[in-house]
Amino acid sequence: MARNIFRMSFAKIYPLYVDKVERKQRSRAELDEVIEWLTGYDEAALQRVLADEVDLETFFEQAPAFNPNATLITGVICGVRVEEIEDPLMQKVRYLDKLVDELARGKKLTSILRAA
C-alpha cells in the first residue's frame, strides 16, 4: 500500500494541497514557500516537477536540499507520529503533509518553517 503512494504524481497531489490551504484563506505562494523550505526546490524547479508529473519518490529523492530542520517537525498526521515513522521516504511525505496541515490551520509561517 505505502509503495503505491510513492508512485503517485506530485502534480496530482499538489492541487489538493492548494485547495486545502486556499479553503483556509492561505495562499498558493505560502504553500510553495513551505514546499521550497522543506525540499530545497526553487520556484522554477517546482514548476518543472509539476509539469513533468514526477512521482513522489522521485520528487523527494531528487530534492535539491532536503531541510535538515525537518527533524523538528513533530506531531500526529493520519494517526501516526511523524517523528516515529521508520520508512525515510514515508517520513518525508508525512513531513510535507504535516506542514500543509499547519499552514491550513493558520499557523504563522515563521513557526511552520521552524525559524528561531
Image (cartoon, helix red, strand yellow):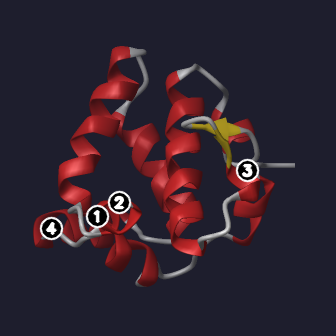
Tell me which amino acid carries mark 3: Ile
Give the Cα separation between the discs numbered 4 and 1.
Answer: 15 Å
Q: Which mark is residue 4?
A: 1
Does 15 sit above or below residue 25? below
Marks 2 and 1 close (CB-CB < 8 Å): yes
Q: Which residue is mark 4?
A: 53
Question: Crowding at label 1, few (<14), some or many (≥20) Cα neighbours within 10 Å?
Answer: few
Quadrant that contains the N terminus: bottom left
Give the Cα separation between the discs numbered 2 and 4.
Answer: 20 Å
Identify the element where label 3 is drawn.
Answer: loop
Q: Nearer the viewer, mark 4 or mark 1?
A: 1
Q: Which residue is situated farthest in the top direction here?
A: 24
Q: Which residue is mark 3?
A: 73
Q: Residue at 49% across / 58% down in the picture?
A: 93
Q: Position of residue 20 (x, y in %)?
A: 35, 26
Q: Position of residue 79 (x, y in %)?
A: 61, 35
Give the Cα separation between the discs numbered 3 and 4.
Answer: 27 Å
> Which comes before the other along the chain, label 1 or label 3?
1
Q: Which residue is situated farthest in the front direction here?
A: 1
Q: Which residue is mark 2?
A: 1
Marks 3 and 4 close (CB-CB < 8 Å): no
Marks 1 and 3 close (CB-CB < 8 Å): no
Give the Cα separation between the discs numbered 1 and 3.
Answer: 24 Å
Quadrant location of residue 28? Answer: top left
Question: Crowding at label 3, few (<14), some or many (≥20) Cα neighbours within 10 Å?
Answer: some
